[in-house]
Each structure stands twice: as C-alpha cells, then as structure tokens.
Amino acid sequence: MKRTRAFEDVLAQIERRIAEDGLTVGDRLPGERQLAEQLGVGRSSVREALRVLETLGVVSSQAGRGPDAGAVLTSRPDTALTDLLRLNLGLATLETREVVDARLMIERWSAAHAAATRAGTSALSAAIEGMDRAGSAEEFVEHDTAFHCAIADASGNRLIAAIMRSLRDAMRRNAIEAVERLGDPSVLRADHERIRAAIEAGDPEEAQRAVADHLAHAYPALFPGH
C-alpha cells in the first residue's frame, strides 16, 4: 500500500495548498525532490502522482532545468480533485470482484477505442519488454501496471486514464498475488502481446476479447467456466 499512500499524500498536499490559496493558476509546484522530502516518499511516487494530475489537466509539466522546469498549476479543480482523492481512499474497502468488474468495463472500452483509432503501441511494447526482464512478481506487476495504464492512455480519454491508475494502485497487492499464484507468467505475457497486436491491427472486437480473456486468466476464481 506504500505507493497508494504516497499517491494520496501528494494529491492531498496539492489540494490543501490550492484550498489555502497557497497556489494559484500559473504558480509552480515544488520540484520532485522537494515534494519527496516533504512527504518522506520516493521521487518515483511523486512523479506518478504528478503524471495523474497532468492527465487530469491540473498541472502542466515542463522538462528542463532552471526556473522554467517543473509542474505548473493550470486549473483549480477543487471538486474534481476531491472526488479523485475520495475514490482512492475508498477503493481499499471494495471487494476484488468489484474492482475487477470495473477494470473489465474500462479496459474493454479503452482497448476497443485505441484499436479503432489506431493508437500508437510503443508504450505497450516497452511494458512487455519490462515484464520479460522482471526478476520478481513485484517487478512484473510494475510493468504490468504500466501496460494497462498505457491502454487507458491510448484511449485518449483523460478521465478514464486517471481512474485506471487509481484502480491499479488499489489492486497492486492482488495483482502480485495473482502472478505468484500462476507461478509462470507466460500466459499473461501472451495475453499482453495479443492485446497489443489487436490494437496495432485496428481490431476493436479482438481487443475486447483479448482483455476479457486476460482478466479471466489472471483471476480464474472470478470467471468460472471461462
């Protein structure tokens, strides 16, 4: 739960600073290193939270060094950010069945839309390569998460992408247990390649089938007789 906790802390701090007028549109957020030190978390956790905020249009990240580097506040989404934070806090109380059902609906739509629009698949391919190099279930799941979030990103819907990241954070422990239970993740690897190929081929129906089959392989107890 460490990554989820860090994600919530970063969102909570930014929301608090916005509410207290500590930040206004056009202001720059503290740098990754400063935020990480303030929260006592790794810079990777801060970076992930900032990516979600950028997806939602809350901040705009700028590369480089000096005064023009870092994330700039681009809107004051008080209600939207509060709702997103509430979603993250509430996910821990949901049953696995509920979260997997939500993932099934979101990912089938996302994969189909990505296929229909012939979205790029480079991020999916990079995640698959990372899974191939993984030396543990935890490392495999890190790249697996990147793969599934990339499907949502490829859909072109920013809210779907943000919700997907929230769901994956909440399901991290379940995902690791699923990989450990399988022992050999080759079937999951094959599923990922099938999904990527369907999106690349522009085949929405096959992309949806591939996603459904993949979740059935990962959580067989939830899909008896599949």
Image (cartoon, rainbow, N blue to C red):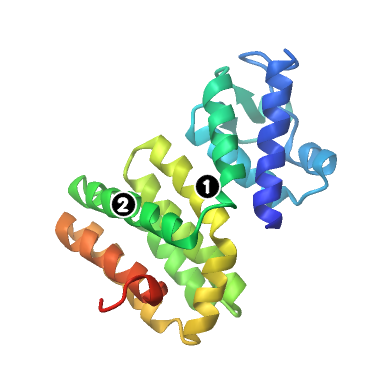
- Quadrant placement of the C terminus: bottom left
The amino acid sitting under disc 2 is Met
The amino acid sitting under disc 1 is Ser
| Residue 63 in the figure: left or right of residue 23 | left
Q: Nearer the viewer, residue 154 or 216?
A: 216
Residue 189 place in picture, x, y as percent: 39, 76
| Residue 148 in the figure: left or right of residue 92 | left
Asked if the residue under mark 2 is in contact with the one under mark 1, i.e. CB atoms within 8 Å, the reply is no
Residue 213 place in picture, x, y as percent: 28, 70
**Crowding near pointer 1: few (<14 within 10 Å), some, many (20+)?**
many
SS type, badge 2: helix
| Residue 203 in the figure: left or right of residue 130 | left
What is the number of the mark on residue 105? 2
Of the image marks 1 and 2, the number of the one nearer the N terminus: 2
Which corner quadrant of the image does residue 174 belong to? bottom right
Q: Which residue is mark 1?
A: 166
At horizontal 49% and vertical 51% (from top left) the residue drawn is: 167
Q: Using the image, determine if residue 83 lies above or below residue 150.
A: above
Residue 65 visible, this angle: no
Q: Residue furthest bottom?
A: 183
| Residue 133 in the figure: left or right of residue 120 | right
Residue 119 place in picture, x, y as percent: 28, 48
At horizontal 59% and vertical 31% (from top left) the residue drawn is: 62
SS type, badge 1: helix
At horizontal 58% and vertical 17% (from top left) the residue drawn is: 76
At horizontal 75% and vertical 30% (from top left) the residue drawn is: 30
- Quadrant placement of the N terminus: bottom right
Residue 114 place in picture, x, y as percent: 26, 49
Mark pair 1, 2: CA separation:
15 Å
